[in-house]
Image: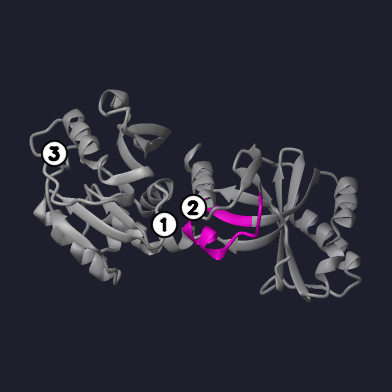
Amino acid sequence: MKHVKSLKYLALLSGENPTLPLSEIKAVLEIEKIDYKIIEIVDRIVIFKVSKDLPKKFYARLSMVHSIHSLLFKSALNFQDIVSSIKSAGIGRYAPECTTFQVRIKKIKCQKVNSEKLERFIGELIRKECKNKMKVDLVNPETRFFGFCHADQIYFCIHRLETGRKDIFKHPVTRRPFFHPTAMKPQVARIMVNLSKAKSGQTFLDPFCGSGSILVEAAFIGSNVLGMDINRKMIIGARKNMTFFNIKYMGLLQASITSLPIKGDFQAMATDPPYGRSSSTHGLNLNELTCNFLNEVQDLIGRGCRICFALPNNIRLLDLFDQKQLKIQETHEYYVHKSLTRKIFVLEKK
């Protein structure tokens, strides 16, 4: 089926965090230089308007968004308004381009709807609007329509593409040649890469690379990656993991953040400094480590470039860096387990 131009899109968020998914959408739109406007945010639904069609690489980068759909209409959740909205939406224009379709209803905090009954009702409406030129196919349809029901509203869409979320979950850290209990989950590593606004073909640095979780995700989106860690065991393990994914990298260096062996400008940076019992800070407390880290790396990135990193939520970051050089753009809380909630910070070079 040909792409039917629609500037309004619906994103279905994963729901695993209250702020990160929306920030990820904004960051990737900005990476792709797409003008946008957020129109509505309702629970796990985000409606946004863009200046041009979304490229496939936009979908592929997202880690905390389930799917993206072109919004056809929003209406009250009753049969009369749905009939009127489907006629107004001009559903019949899809008939010349495809012969089979499917309707799926997804309920989001909406229990009063009989999904199967509503699917059949809307399916019959679409078939009549298309003068029977389109037939229902529940197995392999050419076109998939989705109705997202929330409270007393329905958001009716045509499905575009799945995001990269499913692919990200196919390579969990526990199935890699080298595993360490401090390894960051792929979806969190990917979202940190996205918040850093890393781009394909540009240089990317992780100065506390550990087993390589963040480097792997940065490499998957096409960045030229370089990692460092003071622990030789971690560097050896990271090399094994990068080789496992057939990733070419600029370098993996055993080095201390207090004595960096590199110079030059990096376009993006994301990292996960050691913080817990299973990690080693080699004699520095976390405040000292963070202060040294930010003072060292601020000269490695250019103006307007970003650093994304995670810390335990009890750290007072504003006391630890030169605010004349760096500015906090975003902060997000991320629940890890009952004894640890972390903050993800995004800083930008002034």
- Is residue 108 visible from the viewing direction of this image? no
Q: Residue at x 65, y 46 (%)?
A: 48
Horizontal side of 285 relative to 120 (left or right) equals left
Please, what secondary structure does the residue beneath circle 3 have? loop
Q: Which sits earlier in the primary sequence, circle 3 or circle 2? A: 2
Front label number (3 vs 1): 1
- Which label is found at residue 199? 1
Residue range in magenta is: 50-68
| Color style of the picture | one colour
Q: CA distance from mark 1 to mark 2?
A: 7 Å
Query: What percent of the width, then of the height, locates residue 77?
Result: 80, 43
The C terminus: image quadrant: top left
Query: What percent of the width, then of the height, locates residue 172?
Result: 34, 59
Horizontal side of 254 relative to 113 (left or right) equals left
Corner quadrant of residue 78: top right
- Disc 2 crowd rating (10 Å Cα; few below 14, some 14-19, many 20+) is some
Q: CA distance from mark 3 to mark 2?
A: 33 Å
What amino acid is at disc 3?
A: Thr
- Disc 1 crowd rating (10 Å Cα; few below 14, some 14-19, many 20+) is many
What amino acid is at disc 1?
A: Lys
In the image, residue 310 sits, relative to residue 226, either above or below, namely: above
Q: Which residue is mark 2?
A: 31
Please, what secondary structure does the residue beneath circle 2 have? helix
Query: What percent of the width, then of the height, locates residue 136?
Result: 78, 71
The N terminus: image quadrant: bottom right
What amino acid is at disc 2?
A: Ile
Q: Are marks 1 and 2 in contact (CB under 8 Å)?
A: yes
Horizontal side of 27 relative to 271 (left or right) equals right
Q: Is residue 52 magenta?
A: yes
Query: What percent of the width, then of the height, locates residue 305?
Result: 38, 45
